[in-house]
């Protein structure tokens, strides 16, 4: 779990480690696959999966697809540092953006 913590803390130094650990436990099978552990910013199908499965199903958001897609784009833009987009960090930052961190506890 410490790798997951470090990854998220790199992008969100103020992050709640309890939430990071819970998120990592929830998605541990996904994280065990290197490709699935990353969010591809250039793959529309991947971005739709983040929107549908994480934002709508996990966080229960009902915003328009356009608003959710823009939020994903905003988070990915803040992470654009030449590195990959770790799924846990993307999920944490999205939950934080929408004020839904408690949904991950």
Image (spheres, rainbow, N blue to C red):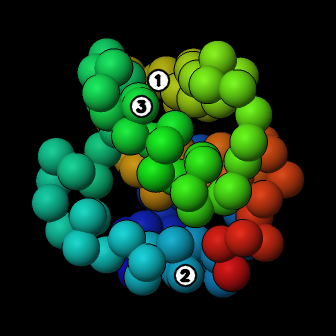
Q: Secondary structure at mark 3?
A: helix
Q: Give the residue drawn at x 49%, y 43%.
A: 52
> Mark 2: few, some, or many residues within 10 Å (few <14, many ≥20)?
some
Residue 22, which numbered label?
A: 2
From the viewer's perspective, tell me whether residue 89 is left or right of residue 61: left
User: Which sits earlier in the primary sequence, circle 2 or circle 3?
Assistant: 2
Foreground residue among 71 and 31? 71
Q: Is residue 99 visible?
A: yes
From the viewer's perspective, tell me whether residue 68 is left or right of residue 27: right
Mark 1 lies on residue: 81
Foreground residue among 45 and 7? 45
**How far from the left and from the top, in percent, is residue 50?**
45, 42
In the image, residue 72 sits, relative to residue 51, either above or below, namely above
Q: Secondary structure at mark 2?
A: helix
From the viewer's perspective, tell me whether residue 33 is left or right of residue 57: left
User: Which sits earlier in the primary sequence, circle 1 or circle 2?
Assistant: 2
Q: Give the residue drawn at x 75%, y 64%.
A: 101
**How far from the left and from the top, in percent, is residue 26?**
43, 78
Residue 48, which numbered label?
A: 3
C-alpha gap between disc 1 and disc 2: 26 Å
Q: Residue furthest right?
A: 99
> Mark 1: few, some, or many residues within 10 Å (few <14, many ≥20)?
few
Badge nearest the viewer, 3 or 1: 3
Picture mark count: 3
Foreground residue among 40 and 61? 61
Snapshot quadrant of residue 98: top right
Q: Give the residue drawn at x 32%, y 33%.
A: 46
Q: Give the residue drawn at x 65%, y 72%.
A: 104
Snapshot quadrant of residue 8: bottom right
Residue 20, which numbered label?
A: none
Badge nearest the viewer, 2 or 3: 3
């Amino acid at each position: 779990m410490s790798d997951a913590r470090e990854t998220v803390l790199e992008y969100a130094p103020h992050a709640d480690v309890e939430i990071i650990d819970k998120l990592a436990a929830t998605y541990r099978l996904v994280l065990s696959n290197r490709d699935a552990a990353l969010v591809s910013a250039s793959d529309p199908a991947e971005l739709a999966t983040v929107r549908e499965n994480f934002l709508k199903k996990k966080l229960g958001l009902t915003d328009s697809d356009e608003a959710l897609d823009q939020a994903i784009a905003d988070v990915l833009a803040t992470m654009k540092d030449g590195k990959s987009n770790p799924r846990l960090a993307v999920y944490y930052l999205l939950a934080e953006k929408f004020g839904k961190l408690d949904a991950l506890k």
